[in-house]
Image (tube, helix red, strand yellow):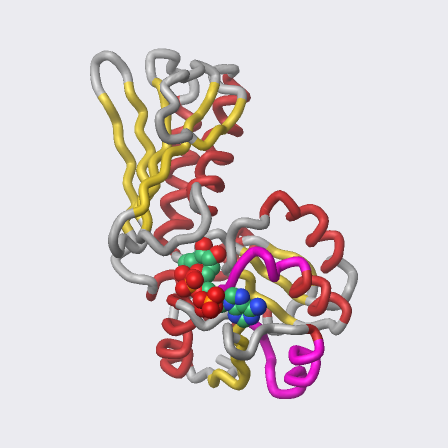
Amino acid sequence: MKKLRLGLVGVGQMGTRLIELAPERGHTITAEFKSNYPFTEERMIQAKDRVDVWIDFSHASLTEKLVKTVSEHQLKLVIGTTGWYDKLDDYKAMVQNSGAGVIYAPNFSTGVYTFNKIVEFAASIMSKLKAYDVAIHEIHHHEKRDAPSGTAKSLAQTLLTHYKASGLKKKVVPLAPGNTDIAADTIYVSSSRVGHVVGRHEIQFDSVEDSIGLIHDARSRNGFALGAIRATEWIYDKQGFYNLDDFFADLLGNQE
Ligand SMILES: NC(=O)c1ccc[n+]([C@@H]2O[C@H](COP(=O)([O-])OP(=O)(O)OC[C@H]3O[C@@H](n4cnc5c(N)ncnc54)[C@H](OP(=O)(O)O)[C@@H]3O)[C@@H](O)[C@H]2O)c1
């Protein structure tokens, strides 16, 4: 495996984990943007020759500038930051054919990727059973800035694809606190923020007779961080705009 020089955009909870874990895979952190030395295009260009791949775990307010910079200068970037997916098509257009290589994911953990596949399979069955309603609930630590989580939104889209096809649900809506006006054609996503919960996602299929629950509970941030580090190794020699399906198609069966 090639030993990489990695640049961090954001040294918060996830960035700190990357600093701990990158050396275990032989990589070196050679640049860091953080609150007292913020990311700017100029600084990223200055650091260009000592960074092979950038990893962003910061804030969605930076994503546009970041994607523009890597596109204009043919850099490699792993985007872990969530909360910008309404701009996905714009950013994809910016990166494609620019010579840059970008991979993004709302959640880089292998467990969550697999969970999404299990949810997809469950949705393919449950969306055909009118007796069962469905909802998503996610719980995170009190410092998380976006709600619902990017992972919950992604799981909701997975459900919606199947429920739209069967005609049982038409849209996904975040469940606002105190809202009891529940529409039958809507998949609701609710959020709690408490203590130090790393990340819990629950899918509930519920009928008069019984209830089926699927749960993913992250035990630490290491799963996200290791996944993001593997993504740097994967994107290093690629050009284009990728998601986790592209990455896991290569990775599954080749875990180190
Ligand atoms: N894809 C995944 O697997 C995954 C996993 C976990 C989290 N996430 C996402 O990753 C993001 C970060 O999560 P986190 O838990 O690490 O959050 P965090 O602890 O708040 O860290 C974000 C860091 O970015 C810094 N930052 C803000 N503006 C900056 C700028 N202009 N230049 C450089 N650094 C800047 C913040 O500094 P200040 O604190 O000083 O503002 C903070 O240290 C969130 O969007 C979260 O949802 C994704």
Q: Is residue 159 above or below residue 153?
A: above
Q: Is residue 7 visible?
A: no
Residue lying farthest left?
209
Q: Position of residue 40 (x, y in %)?
A: 65, 73
Q: Specify the quadrant of the image occupied by residue 123.
A: top left
* Residue 99 versus residue 172 in the image, above or below: below
Query: At 43% from the left edge and 41% from the top edge, which residue is drawn?
Result: 148
Counting every numbered tag in the picture gives 0
Magenta segment includes 43: yes
| Residue at position x 73%, y 72% in the image | 74
Residue span colored magenta: 42-64
Which image quarter is the C terminus in?
bottom left
From this viewpoint, is residue 109 visible? yes
Q: Residue at x 36, y 44 (%)?
A: 115
Is residue 104 rendered to the left or right of residue 146? Answer: right
Nearer-the-camera pick, 217 or 233? 217
Q: Position of residue 212 (x, y in %)?
A: 26, 27
Residue 213: image x %, image y %?
A: 26, 32
Q: Position of residue 3 (x, y in %)?
A: 50, 84
Asked whether residue 151 is drawn in magenta, I would say no
Horizontal relation, residue 169 to residue 221: left or right? right
Q: Residue at x 44, y 43 (%)?
A: 147
